[in-house]
Image (cartoon, grey):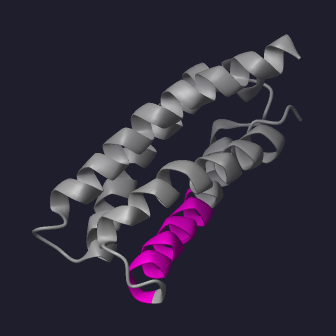
């Protein structure tokens, strides 16, 4: 239980930093590009930070037992794709579905996607093989 709590806390720290960079980039770019382009830009910046942080810090113990670097990177890329689709969904839901101001999508990007991502990383990407 203590190990899981440590992973959650480390994941939260890395995730908060990556999410903050993502949402900050998203919000900062809204006056220059469309909401979807702003989301894509923020997502790409956050994902690089995420991979390094989660592999070397959040799941450092299990990442060494989770498979080869290539397999790990491929699984991480799949989770990134799922996360991107989720974030694009949040932006579409907020701006097109609900008709709200585009900034509100940041709340969904910051809360919904990280919870799903943790589960995928913990039990699939970094699960010891």
Q: Nearer the viewer, residue 118 or 66?
A: 118
Prevalent SS, magenta region: helix
Foreground pick, 73 / 28: 28
| Residue 23 drawn above or below residue 2 | below
Residue 108, position as x, y percentages in the image? 51, 59
119 above or below 102?
above
Q: Which residue shows up at 64% across the image and 60% down it?
A: 78
Q: In the displayed image of the protein, which residue is found farthest to the left?
A: 32
- In depth, the one of 76 and 2 nearer the eye is 2
Asked if the magenta segment contains residue 86, the reply would be yes
In percent of width and height, residue 61 lies at: 73, 17
Asked where in the image residue 123 lies, by quadrant, the reply is top right
Is residue 99 one of those drawn in magenta? Answer: no
Residue 104 shows in this picture: yes
Residue 32: x %, y % from top left: 10, 69
| Above or below: residue 99 compared with residue 88 | below
Report if residue 61 is visible in the image: no
Q: Residue at x 57, y 67 (%)?
A: 86
Residue 126 placement: quadrant? top right
Q: Which residues are magenta?
A: 80-96
Image quadrant in which the C terminus is located: top right
Q: Residue at x 24, y 57 (%)?
A: 27
**Based on the displayed image, in which of its 4 quarters is residue 85 positioned?**
bottom right
Q: Is residue 75 left or right of residue 3?
A: left
Q: Residue at x 32, y 42 (%)?
A: 21
């Amino acid at each position: 239980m203590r190990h899981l709590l440590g992973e959650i806390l480390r994941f939260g720290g890395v995730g908060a930093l990556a999410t903050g960079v993502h949402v900050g980039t998203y919000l900062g770019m809204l006056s220059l590009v469309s909401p979807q382009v702003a989301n894509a830009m923020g997502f790409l910046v956050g994902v690089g930070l995420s991979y390094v942080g989660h592999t070397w810090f959040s799941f450092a113990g299990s990442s060494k037992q989770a498979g080869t670097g290539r397999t790990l990177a491929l699984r991480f890329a799949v989770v990134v794709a799922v996360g991107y689709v989720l974030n694009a969904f949040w932006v579409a839901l907020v701006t097109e579905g609900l008709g709200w101001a585009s900034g509100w999508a940041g709340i969904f990007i910051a809360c919904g996607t990280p919870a799903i991502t943790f589960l995928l990383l913990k039990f699939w990407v970094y699960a010891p093989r």
